[in-house]
Image (cartoon, helix red, strand yellow):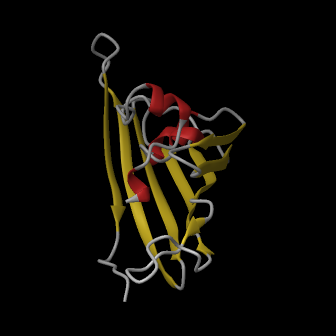
Amino acid sequence: NFLKLETGIRGIGMGGAHVASARNIGSVGYNPAGISFTKGSDLYCSYRSYLIDIAIGSIGFARQLSPTNFLGFHLFYLDSGDIERTTLDFPDGGLGYYKVQDLVFSTIFSKMLTDRLRLGINFKYIREDIWETAFSTMAMDVGSIFDTGIYGMTLGMSVSNFAPEIQFH
């Protein structure tokens, strides 16, 4: 579920409606084609306190490789802070602490096919640790941004977190 959290400041401000207006490495969680607006290079850092003691952060870098090709890297993490362990026998705790830690590392490639159509693909390594249990997997996002040329209207499409089914054991 942590993959559903909003990651970019602009996207958060737009209530997550950011697929068609993605314009930098900070919007890679919404549409990987957004890095194709990079001129030269782009660096993005974000940190925020979420609910209770949960910390969320991200850092990304994108670079224009040629007039039509773009490459980016993005790291997104979540740290729950210390959570006191409880059981049915010890509902008041006293058993120590544990953390929930989530990590997504992305490699993004985007290409301008025409002056109006941009495509992007994002390959992600995902890891989640909860106390003594963990999983990791690979996932992929695919996105596009199309400038219709009609009164400034832009269309965006993104398929996110395309991956095999995973679960804790």
| Viewer-nearest residue: 82 or 112 | 82
- The residue sitting at 41% across, 83% down in the picture is 89
Counting labels gives 0
The N terminus lies in quadrant: bottom left
**Quadrant of res 102:** bottom right
The C terminus lies in quadrant: bottom left
| Viewer-nearest residue: 65 or 80 | 80
Q: Residue furthest bottom?
A: 169
Against 102, residue 153 (above or below) is above
- The residue sitting at 30% across, 19% down in the picture is 153
- The residue sitting at 60% across, 47% down in the picture is 70
Residue 68 is situated, as x and y percent measured from the top left of the image, at 56, 42
| Viewer-nearest residue: 28 or 151 | 28
**Quadrant of res 24:** top right
Residue 9 is situated, as x and y percent measured from the top left of the image, at 55, 32
Q: Residue furthest top?
A: 151
Against 131, residue 17 (above or below) is above
Residue 13 is situated, as x and y percent measured from the top left of the image, at 46, 26
- Going by the image, does 4 lie left or right of 100? left
Against 77, residue 112 (above or below) is above
Residue 163 is situated, as x and y percent measured from the top left of the image, at 34, 71
- Going by the image, does 104 lie left or right of 88? right
- The residue sitting at 43% across, 48% down in the picture is 5
